[in-house]
Amino acid sequence: MEQRIRVLNGAQVRQGGRYVLYWCRANRRAESNHALAFAASLANQSRLPLLFFESLGCGYPYASDRLHTFALEGVPDTAARLGALGIGYIFHLARRKRQPSALKALARDAAAVVTDDWPLAPVDAGVPCYAVDASCIVPASAIPQRAYAAYSIRGKIHKLLPQFLAPAPLPRVQKAFRGTAPEWHTEVLAERIPELVASCEIDHGVAPSTGFRGGRSQAELRLREFLKHRLSRYAREKNEPSAHATSDLSPYLHLGYISSLEVALAARDYAGRHKLIADEFLEELIVRRELAFNFAKHAKRVDSLDELPQWARATLRRHRRDRRRPLYSRDEFEAATTHDDLWNATQKELLLRGKIHGYYRMYWGKKILEWSATPEEALATMIHLHDRYALDGQDPNTYANILWCFGLHDRPWPERPVFGTVRSMTRAGMERKTGVAAYIEEIESLELTGKETTT
């Protein structure tokens, strides 16, 4: 546990504090949560109750009905599970972009504050503050150097997995929380979510997802369905969207409804019991995901072409003046009005579901690069579209996967116009390798009916 913990200030545990406060920033769950487990241990040592605080404001980038709904759908589940464990739960829904900090009000009565190790500023509250890495299986601090490709981090991760690939139980809290909620606490009931969302100062032009509902229970359901019906097909069908062989867990991992640790343990154990091979899934879940977190930890800016390897920057620079035909604006991309019905279908999947199948998202990104005036414009378009519509956006994986389209974590390929030696993807290649017609038909049906039939 020690390698997961970072001390944010030098304050002493406040004598007379009423509770230990867990400020939930990224991991919205009671289970398999190293940060909450550390907070519970600290509370028990101090003979204090534990209070779990979660908030949802309007000021985060691209705040919308879609993202707000997905976050709020998890609140009733979280409240019920924490209550059963004797842990207090306070949720604050800030309806306007500029509202006073609820965190500081709670921190004033805390003996200590524990939060998720995510980019943040220390809490100026006069109490000790700890950040705990509960997002990665191998904590980021265990691999201090930046990795420039999967091969350069894979061996390090596998060497450390025996130490970290183990359950993270929550200690039983010895003193139940008996405090009363402040007046600004928001009671969230499932039937009230549309009303709550409508009352917020956010983008009401992005509707909730057609296929994903938020919350811990939904994440657990997705995991069970994946293990039972998809894991056995994953290695051979993961790149075929119409086969629906992937886990569809990325939105739940991003919001912290489920941890990569428990998914990895469940997949490994299920594969062992049923004589399956889960290696390719675990490679994506562990090595590729934690490569993205390694990138986010070390990059100066996760949304900049300056983070590309030198060869990628050089080849894009050499091909900057290449003719680009067709050429589309951001608005045309956003409206899915290109000449390519496959690309349009990937964008419509993003608009409707809030997620693009992983393999087709590569094609989506590569074509934006090919059909934009400059690489910088292409990058800005990708980030805008993904951050606005994707339930798994604004995540280390988002930025690493988008920059992969420009050469990050990749190698040089044969030279082509526009791309130079950055890997390209073609419509002909997609038709040769995948069922393009079946995918387009599925998305057209979803667009027409608004109803999911396979997810």
Image (cartoon, rainbow, N blue to C red):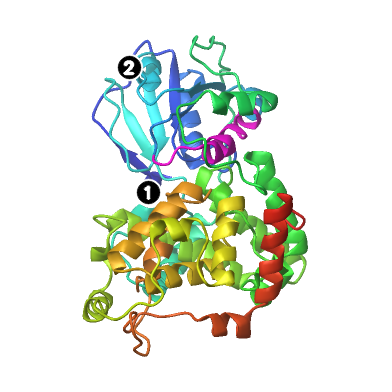
- Image coordinates of residue 83 in percent, x first then y, are 63, 23
- Between marks 1 and 2, how big is the CA–CA gap? 24 Å
Look at 58% across and 70% down and name the residue there.
341
Looking at the image, the residue that sits furthest to the bottom is: 414
Q: Check if residue 197 falls in the magenta segment.
A: no
The vertical placement of 38 against 101, above or below, is below
Q: Position of residue 162 (x, y in %)?
A: 51, 62
Q: Is residue 109 left or right of residue 252?
A: left
In which quarter of the view is residue 316 placed?
Answer: bottom left
State the residue position of label 2.
14
User: Number of numbered discs present?
Assistant: 2
Q: Which is more toward the observer, 267 or 93?
A: 93
SS for dot 1:
helix
Residue 152 is tagged as none
> Which region of the structure is painted magenta?
61-79
306 left or right of 421 in image: left
Name above or below for residue 221 compared with residue 97: below
Above/below status of 133 relative to 74: below
- Find residue 283 and report its horizontal and vertical position in percent: 53, 69
Q: Which residue is mark 1?
A: 3
